[in-house]
Every structure is written in structure tokens, then in C-alpha cells.
Image (cartoon, helix red, strand yellow):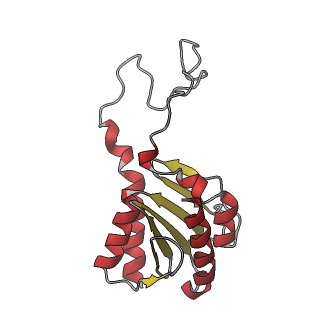
Amino acid sequence: MRTRRLIALALTATLFTAPAGCGGDEPPAAGAAAPGAGSPVADPTGEAPAEPSAEPVDDAAGPDACALVSKADAERLAGTPLDEPVAAGQSCTYTGPTSGPTAQVEVFVGDGAKKYLDIERQLEHEIRELAGTADEALLTAEAFFLRKGDLWVAVRLVRLNDPQENRAPLERLARTVAGRM
């Protein structure tokens, strides 16, 4: 069980730290804006940031991870209030406040969800079928995986409790998410 948690933490850390290293090690050139300094307050020219593009979103990327699992859904699953979601690419993460209790709900859409399932299989973790939910629906002690057509979705719950307590809430949310896919 300890190995499973360490691997899960390593996977989560990789997903969240990999994009942080994309900017290189060079500091910004003199006079250049620091990364993420796009607000009118940080912009020395005083110009407002560009409006978001009205271009249609490519549906091939799949649905929005935070729309598949709302904050209310994540809080019901975790059994505790959670902070606002943090979206990154095709993932969405809800974390418990630093005052506790420890809880996190992670949602992955697309290739990341499939890769997470592949890792669970390689580690030979117990994976059960969840019948009548999607084209393919699988459940582990801490997550579920859904496939409709070519689209994969994974939802993972991190709590410091007996994983058996999470089985019914995971199954309920899997059915809800399958209906939204």
C-alpha cells in the first residue's frame, strides 16, 4: 500500500511540475515582462491584456475536466470542503484547505487518464469492472476510469481513510461523470 501511495504521489508531482520547467533556466531579458505578468497592474505599458479568443474550442481534446466533476461533486466525494479547482491542460484538481482534513480530487481527461490506467495495470493493482456505466468502466481503491468511444476519463480521490469507505462514493460519481461525457 505504501508503494502505491508513493507512486501515485510521484505521478501527481510529475503532472504538475513538468509544465513548470518548460520556460528554460534563463531569466527574462532586461525590460521584458516576467512570466505570468500579464495583468494591467504588472504591465508597465498600462495596456489591458488581450481578450480571450472567440475561436471555437477543438472538441477532439475532450470535455473540460472541471465541468465533468464540479466542485460540489468533488466535495461530496471527498466528504469535506475543498478549495476552488485548479485546471491545467486536460486535468482539474480540487484540494482540501491547508487547515485540513487532507483531501484531494483529481480529474484527468484524454491521454493522461489512459496513461494513469496503464500504470495501475503495470503495477498489478486490483482493478474491478463497474458494469453499466460506460463503454468501459473500471474501479480501483482510490480511482475510477471511464471510456466512451476513444475518450478516457479518470478521477482519483486522495484521503487518509480506509479506502473501502470511498468505494460507494466513487461508484456514484463514476455514473454521474459517465452521463456527462
Picture coordinates of residue 129, whole percent (x, y): 45, 83
Picture coordinates of residue 103, whole percent (x, y): 60, 69
Which residue shows up at 37% across the image and 67% down it?
116
Quadrant of the rendering where the C terminus is positioned: bottom right
Q: Using the rendered view, name the quadrant where residue 73 is placed.
A: bottom right
Return the residue nearer the eye: 48 or 155.
Answer: 155
Return the residue nearer the eye: 32 or 79.
Answer: 79
Picture coordinates of residue 46, whole percent (x, y): 58, 13
Which residue shows up at 41% across the image and 71% down it?
8
Which residue shows up at 63% across the image and 75% down it?
172
Total count of labels: 0
Quadrant of the rendering where the N terminus is positioned: bottom left
Picture coordinates of residue 83, whole percent (x, y): 66, 56
Return the residue nearer the eye: 145 or 60.
Answer: 60
Where is 169 relative to 108, above or below?
below
Where is 138 relative to 85, above or below?
below
Q: Using the rendered view, name the quadrant where residue 158 is placed.
A: bottom right
- Whether residue 99 is visible, yes or no, is no
